[in-house]
Amino acid sequence: MTEERRVNHYDLIIVGGGMVGTAIACGLADSGMRIAVLEAAEWTVPWQPEQVDPRVSALTEASLAFLQSLNAWPGMTQMRVTPYQQMKVWEADGTGHIEFSCDDIHAENIGHIVENSVTLNALHQQLEQTDVEVIRGAQLVGITEAFKDEYGVERSVMLADGTQLSAQLIVATDGARSKLREWGGFETREWDYGHDAIVTTIKLEQPHQGTCWQRFMPTGPLALLPITFNGDDRYCSIVWSTTPDEAARLSALSDEDFCAELSLAFEHRLGKVISCDPRFSFPLRQRHAKTYWKPGLVLAGDAAHTIHPLAGQGVNLGLLDAATLVEELANAWQRQQPLGIEQTLGKYQRRRMPDNLKMMALMESFKRIYGPVPVGVRWIRNVGMNLVNQTPMVKKQLLRQALGERAGLPEAAKVHLA
Ligand SMILES: Cc1cc2nc3c(=O)[nH]c(=O)nc-3n(C[C@H](O)[C@H](O)[C@H](O)COP(=O)(O)OP(=O)(O)OC[C@H]3O[C@@H](n4cnc5c(N)ncnc54)[C@H](O)[C@@H]3O)c2cc1C
């Protein structure tokens, strides 16, 4: 082995320092592995106390437990997190509605609304205190299989300046449009939802009541997620999913006209929308890799799956991938088993793929049921929604799922409800 090769060799290389990649690095930082995180961006977007990040996530209790195990949660609460105790969901086209309250399952909260920059900054602060090497501004141009024997393979990533970095295992957490997934030859199933999502922060006339609000319209769901900003609880982050044409029209409106349309779309349930921040719009695409691993290469987070934001599950699934991968890799490392082989990565896939697929199927059926449907179907939908609302056992079960309580969770993300 040449000197240069030894210097550039790691046990684990994580490509993509977003929430999922950084969480994996934090989770394995004390394992004794030599780890590098390669991130394309030069800087972590700093968290800004005077500005609400337009990208927020509704973190479940399972995600919170994992972030606590990484010691990131205390830092996050010092920045800004908004707990919510209720969810109210209703239909524009009829009388169907469901309300959930944390009291139904004797929990303190259902979840927390957290700006993505808060989670990312807290994780990066934790990472800075470890020996994990973070290479920023990394420009990757490809990956190769550097070495192969009966114990496994070794992969290399190639950087634009000609440097090659090799590892037993490369973890691809480089997001929805993952280059590593493409270079690794992973097949995906994907389709457009036919929706774009508009996100921004708004101020309302009335307080948000610690409630996540969702109104299903034939064009798509509108979600208002509570944010308490400088002690003022009249703010919400919105995710308005609608047809691309409608999204383009809404994006082009003046702030005043947009607030007026939003007030109407939300049926003035919290009075008028007084103001809004700049709006951003994202095309929504469902994508799922048919396999999560190949020898020496594994996918996690949005690189493995992207899902409609209507139930706010994207990063929660990604953090569960992270917690599971951390558990499997730490076990393999302790047993001195290679990291990039079937025994390690196959188990990760078997634990995560069914859960991810189940959630994606659920979101797809929601999207179809609440899209434009014949009157008869609409009637059944209304009746069904109201029936669920009146059946405490079913509601409890749905609520436990929303909190992230499921069988087979990794130890670090276990939720313990009364
Ligand atoms: C409108 C909208 C609303 C959403 N709301 C929610 C919600 O309420 N709840 C929820 O759970 N999820 C939500 N999501 C989904 C959530 O944002 C994603 O699931 C989450 O950001 C995925 O995290 P990740 O770390 O896998 O990927 P990303 O956040 O995309 O991070 C990928 C990282 O990899 C880096 N990178 C990319 N390419 C390279 C490369 N070639 N080399 C090196 N680095 C690279 C990027 O710079 C980035 O830092 C929403 C998504 C959208 C679009």
Image: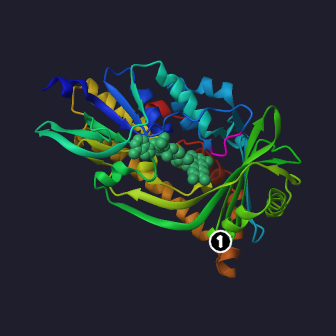
- SS assignment at label 1: helix
Residue 362 in the image, given as x and y percentages of width and height: 53, 60
Q: Is residue 64 left or right of residue 177?
A: right
Above or below, 34 relative to 392: above
Q: Quadrant of residue 72?
A: top right
For label 1, being within 8 Å of ligand 1 is answered: no
Residue numbers of the magenta segment: 52-56
Instruction: Tell whether 347 sits left or right of 194.
Output: left
Q: On the image, which quarter does residue 246 sit in?
A: bottom right
The residue carrying mark 1 is 245
Give left or right: position of 51 versus 327.
right
Q: Which quadrant: the N terminus? A: top left
Q: Residue at x 67, y 66 (%)?
A: 248
Q: Residue furthest left?
A: 150
Local crowd size for mark 1, using a 10 Å CA cut-off: few (<14), some (14–19), many (≥20): few
Percent from the top left, x then y, of residue 68? 55, 27
Question: What secondary structure predominates along the stretch shown in magenta?
Answer: loop
Q: How is the image coloured?
A: rainbow
- Out of 411 and 188, give the one closest to the viewer: 188
Identify which residue is drawn at 34% across, 48% down. Answer: 180
Magenta stretch encompasses residue 301: no
